[in-house]
Amino acid sequence: MSAEALIDAAIWTALDTALTEPVYGAGNVPDNIEDRYVVIGNNTAIDWSTDGRTGFEVTVTIHTWDTLPTSRGFYNLKLLMGQVYITLNRVKLSIPDYNTLELDYEFSESMLDPDGLTTHGVQRFRAYMRAL
């Protein structure tokens, strides 16, 4: 399995355990959902290998949405983003066949989607992985 798939699976487990909101992989969100939810999105992977040892620097983008009609503004979205931050920042994930250094927070952004009602948050985390 690829390093990116392994880190996504570890992040999904961490978020699904810590949050009450549903967590999805990109492309797996049900249609017409009305909820606050989290999506594990885009990744980048850069080779971080050394002589004789495979490694990767991986970034993972986490999207949060609040599509509830009762929510107005960014307050509830930002609370959810805070929970994602607490769950993932500086955590050492358990990933089979890899020694993973801490997952580090890089940035976050919140925005209003084009429908004028849905709030959307984007956060990015970076990890360094070395094969055992």
Image (cartoon, rainbow, N blue to C red):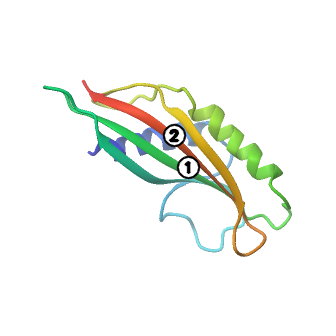
The residues tagged by marks 2 and 1 sit, at their Cα atoms, a distance apart of 8 Å
Tag 1 or tag 2, which sits nearer the N-term? Answer: 1
Judging by the rendered image, the residue that carries numbered circle 2 is 125
131, above or below 62, in the image: above
Residue contact at pointers 2 and 1, CB within 8 angstroms: yes
Which residue appears at 48% of the width and 60% of the height? Answer: 26
Tell me if mark 1 has few (under 14), some (14-19) or many (20+) residues whose alpha carbon lies within 10 angstroms of its own: many
At x 71%, y 39%, the residue is: 82
In-image side of 53 versus 44 (left or right): left
Image quarter in which the C terminus is found: top left
Residue drawn 65% across the image and 32% down it: 86
Question: Helix or strand or loop: what does disc 1 sit on?
Answer: strand
Q: Label 1 is placed on what type of residue?
A: Ile
Q: Going 43% across and 34% down the picture, which residue do you hit?
A: 127
Query: Along the line of sight, which residue is nearer the eye, 35 or 49?
Result: 49
Residue 29 location (% of width, % of height): 55, 64
Q: Which residue is mark 1?
A: 62
Pointer 2 local density, CA inside 10 Å: few below 14, some 14–19, many at least 20: many
The N terminus - image quarter: top left
Question: Residue 121: image x %, image y %?
Answer: 66, 54
Mark 2 vs mark 1: give the one in front: 2
Q: Residue furthest left?
A: 52
Task: Look at the picture and state if 70 lies above or below 31.
Answer: above
Secondary structure at numbered mark 2: strand
